[in-house]
Image (cartoon, rainbow, N blue to C red):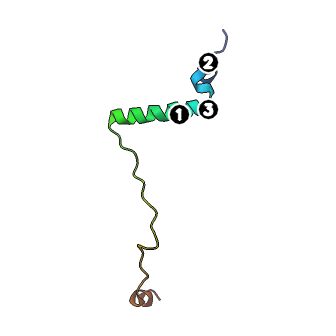
């Protein structure tokens, strides 16, 4: 009995890594849409503008 070839060796769509990555991403998107899954939320990095410096009271309490 001859050993079976791997799927990557026999499937022309899987041989090219770029095409394979695109097809995988497409499949995940389609499957997620079908199942009603939502993409993960991306939280923006906190900006220095939104932060406040600690007051003198807070600093005195900590020491």
Q: Position of residue 40 (x, y in %)?
A: 40, 48
Q: CA distance from mark 3 to mark 2?
A: 14 Å
Residue at position x 66%, y 15% in the image? 3
Residue at position x 61%, y 24% in the image? 8
Q: From the viewer's perspective, is the residue at label 3 or at label 2 nearer?
A: 3
Identify the image quadrant of residue 61: bottom left
Q: CA distance from mark 1 to mark 3?
A: 9 Å
Question: Looking at the image, is 63 positioned above or below residue 34?
Answer: below
Q: Nearer the viewer, residue 1 or 22?
A: 22
Left or right of residue 21, residue 49 in this image:
left
Going from N to C along the chain, the mark reached first, 3 or 2, is 2
Query: Which residue reaches farthest left?
Result: 36
Question: Looking at the image, is 13 positioned above or below residue 38?
Answer: above
Q: Are marks 1 and 2 in contact (CB under 8 Å)?
A: no
Residue assigned mark 1 = 22
Q: Position of residue 50 (x, y in %)?
A: 41, 73
Query: Which residue reaches farthest front?
Result: 49
Q: Residues within 10 Å of mark 3 (few under 14, many from 20)?
A: few
Going from N to C along the chain, the mark reached first, 1 or 3, is 3
Q: CA distance from mark 1 to mark 2?
A: 18 Å
Question: Looking at the image, is 14 positioned above or below residue 28?
Answer: above
Going from N to C along the chain, the mark reached first, 1 or 2, is 2
Residue assigned mark 3 = 17
Residue at position x 42%, y 75% in the image? 51
Q: Are marks 1 and 3 in contact (CB under 8 Å)?
A: no
Q: Residues within 10 Å of mark 1 (few under 14, many from 20)?
A: few
Residue at position x 43%, y 82% in the image? 53
Q: Secondary structure at mark 2?
A: helix
Residue assigned mark 2 = 10
Which mark, residue 46? none
């Amino acid at each position: 009995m001859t050993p079976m070839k791997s799927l990557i060796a026999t499937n022309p769509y899987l041989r090219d890594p770029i095409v394979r990555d695109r097809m995988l991403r497409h499949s995940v998107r389609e499957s997620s849409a079908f199942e009603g899954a939502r993409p993960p939320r991306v939280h923006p990095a906190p900006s220095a503008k939104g932060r406040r410096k600690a007051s003198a009271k807070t600093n005195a309490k900590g020491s």
